[in-house]
Amino acid sequence: MSVNHDLIPNNVDLSSDKRLQRALNAWHPKFMEWWKAMGPDSFQGSEVYLRTAVSVQAGGWANYDFVRMPEYRWGIFLTPFKEERSIHFGDNIGKPTWDEVPGEFRKELRRLIVTQADTEPASVEQQRMLGHCAPSLMDMRSLFQVNVEEARHLWAMVYLLHQHFGKRGREEAEDLLIRRSGNSDTPRILSTFNDPIQDWFDLYCFTMFTDRDGKFQLAALSESAFDPLARTTKFMLTEEAYHLSVGETGIGRVIQRSADLMRAGEDDLVKAGAIPFEIIQKYINFWFASSIDLFGSEDSSNAASFFAAGLKGRFDESNRELHPDPQGNGSFSYETWDSEDQRVTHEIPLRRAMNALLRDAYVRDCERVLKRWNRILEQTELPVRIMLPSVRFNRRVGVYAPRCYDPHGAPISESAFEAKRDDWLPTEADKAYVKSLMHQVVEPGKFANWISAPRRGVNKLPIDAQYVRI
Ligand SMILES: [Fe+2]
Ligand SMILES: [Fe+2]
């Protein structure tokens, strides 16, 4: 079976690259099988108002039209960099960046790319049933937009594997279509991507917190000395911004709705069919902690060697006001508490703290969004506020994982944590309640009771446009 390469938007000269064509010919039918089996359930024949990236020129990444998802034109794009690049951090500053993978970093780079790549199809699989209970046509469209773009991110990473990693790369590209989110025999690589996303509030939390981890990982890779990786991830970031806005505005609209109902005199949000603030807070606690785990351990010798070699930089690495020392010398300190509740101060070389630095940039980004949500609450003059838990809370990975901390970061015993677990993290009853609110709303311009309407439509279309022709 051969692929019509003219239909694949790209700026990698696909039409004359026979080797790449051959690799894609073999992979593409398997991708389509995967999409049909694991993409959005039941909506493959619907026409969806989607944007498609057709070029890297300004605006070229946002062409809108009604498309059936299996006919979506997944493309391959590398952001063109204007200037000649040289390595700008780590041990090899000033040397030219690499167009091909250096032999000594082959394994590390392949691992970095495969780990990132694996999250892309995983999230599509996690979200595949959500179309059935979308709170509006506009939200359904947002979900499908995110899904097709995550699949394009898979393409972007597969391009790197095909083009730069030979036979082993082609095998890895196939394995990306074989692993399945939540499957005990062939799970996805990272544990967060094996948890099912059962309701739309989960989806908004995922796109707010977990996709945001993706933003920071991609940003760190976009500094890479391996030039094709830097340029591929740079382009992915343009699409990622939309995913984050789905999460931020989604949670914002849930907060708005609950606040509006309370201001209108409802004191029981469950009776009113909306999401109570305690449940909102618990979901945020859960998703923030599980997303923070994705950064890996705060103290990591792997992270240090990735930085030294120039494989992965800090967030906004080129900004020398933010990072005056391109070699990343200096130290990083953090505190933990031992099993006797004694405070222990750790000081580690800054390079070993690269995951922690990336995490801190992420936390600052989350805090900015929290302020916006709390502004909604200030405007409704309710006393309630949403908070971000401490980075020490409920960790499974890293230096805080060995013991328990409360949402403010204070050390507590395991039994004290267990006694408070239901106050801090979603219970089965909370999840069942949120799930009970999920009913599909498909009348244009109408929204489920538990969420307010967005401020504006998509691409200047009105809010009541027929975004999905089911
Ligand atoms: Fe992605
Ligand atoms: Fe994303």
Image (cartoon, grey):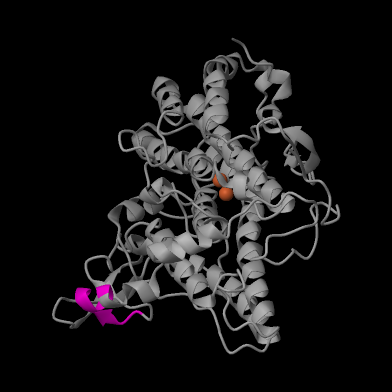
What's the residue at 52%, 21% (across, down)? 30
Position of residue 430 measured from the top left corner of the image (x, y, whole percent)? 45, 66
Q: Nearer the viewer, residue 118 or 71?
A: 71
Q: Position of residue 405 (x, y in %)?
A: 29, 76
Indicate the position of residue 394 as horizontal and vertical percent values.
33, 68
Question: Is residue 123 visible to the viewer in this orientation of the structure?
Answer: yes
Q: Position of residue 218 (x, y in %)?
A: 53, 50
Q: Which corner quadrant holds the C terminus?
A: top right
Q: Residue at horizontal 54%, vertical 36%? A: 154
Name the side, left or right, on which 88 lies relative to 253.
Answer: left
Q: Is residue 358 visible?
A: no
- Quarter holding the N terminus is top right
Q: Residue placed farthest to the left in the image?
A: 340
Q: Nearer the viewer, residue 262 or 67?
A: 262
Q: Is residue 125 above or below residue 333?
A: above
Q: Residue furthest front?
A: 271
* Along the line of sight, the residue nearer the viewer: 280 or 324: 280
Residue 165, by quadrant, is top left
Q: Nearer the viewer, residue 48 or 387?
A: 48
- The residue at the point 33 percent across, 63 percent down is 298
Image position of 393 with respect to 302: above or below: below
Q: Which residues are magenta?
A: 409-418
Q: Image height check: is 98 above or below 450?
A: above
Q: Is residue 109 magenta?
A: no
- Could you tell whether 188 is left or right of 344 in the image? right
